[in-house]
Image (cartoon, helix red, strand yellow):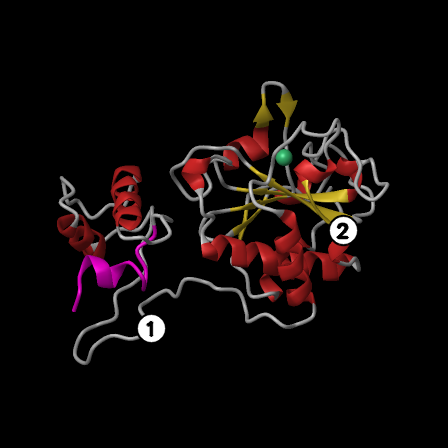
Amino acid sequence: MAYALTWLPAVLDAAGLKVAEVPGWQNRGRAEMGTPLGCMVHHTAGPRAGNMPSLRTLVDGRPDLPGPLCQLGLGRDGTWYVVAAGRANHAGAGNWRGETQGNSHFIGIEAENTGGADDLPWPEVQMSALVHGLAALLRHIGRDVDWCAGHKEYALPSGRKNDPSFDMGPLRMQVAQALAGNLPPPALIPAVEPAAPPGLPPRPTVRRGSAGADVTRLQQLLHIEPADGLFGPGTEAVVRQFQRDHGLVPDGIIGPKTWPLLEPR
Ligand SMILES: [Zn+2]
């Protein structure tokens, strides 16, 4: 039997966000969740490479904590992963505005980030998706921005948690702007370059999992051997380093900002 939060993907999708349903999510949960009163933001403290490398852990849990560990995951490219429609183990002991039953009343959002200095700044596309997603979720449950909490703000004893690694105050100001309709739509990386010179085809956005001639081309440009046309973890690591070296957000995705630096034309 499906749990109650079956509305999650539709609400995020309607907000113009990219949504990936993790198979079995409708029936996944510790039990039925109580009435959602707010959202709680976490970082995964997962690996540095990949878009959502912690997904398996969010679904299955850890040796010390059975899954699911959230209702929603948020990848580095701004994709929302729907993990569970029921209650999840994410909050632990704490208090936010008098509410102490975090797992029963807060939708848990695990955003992929190591939580360390090696993973700053957070990708713009991920933060934009977070702001717009939080606004859509809060609007749906009829709560205001004060019900968007960081795990580090809720957790007791004070200092037990340090996630997320950004300040919640500015995030809430952005979410309030989104709720008021004062923000442009979510920044999604276009599927192809918006503008190409006359006579040249626009280059597609490629990321881990992509394959084909455009991947072969970028592997040649980055001197990756073999240039097999398969965008795997090795290619992604080289792409991230290239982006760091050129002052770009190291999201490992070759899109309209990275292509021109890789192959000017
Ligand atoms: Zn947390």
In which quarter of the view is residue 171 placed?
A: bottom right
Instruction: Identify the residue at image location x=69%, y=63%.
Output: 176
Q: Nearer the viewer, residue 113 or 106?
A: 113
Q: Is residue 152 above or below residue 141?
A: above
Q: Which numbered disc covers residue 73?
A: none
In-image side of 106 versus 229 (left or right): right
Q: For the residue carrying disc 1, how many other residues have a C-alpha within 10 Å: few (<14), some (14-19), or many (20+)?
A: few
Quick check: which quadrant has ligand 1?
Answer: top right
Report the label total: 2
Q: Amino acid at mark 1?
A: Pro
Q: Residue furthest top?
A: 63
Visible residue check, residue 211 = yes
Q: Please state the horizontal and vertical placement of residue 49, each as a whole percent of the image.
A: 38, 38
Instruction: Give SS at disc 2.
Output: helix
Q: Confirm whether residue 9 shows in the render.
A: no
Disc number for residue 147? 2
Q: Residues within 10 Å of mark 2 (few under 14, many from 20)?
A: some
Is residue 263 found inside the magenta-colored segment of the image?
yes
Residue occupied by mark 1 = 194
Q: Which residues are magenta?
A: 253-265
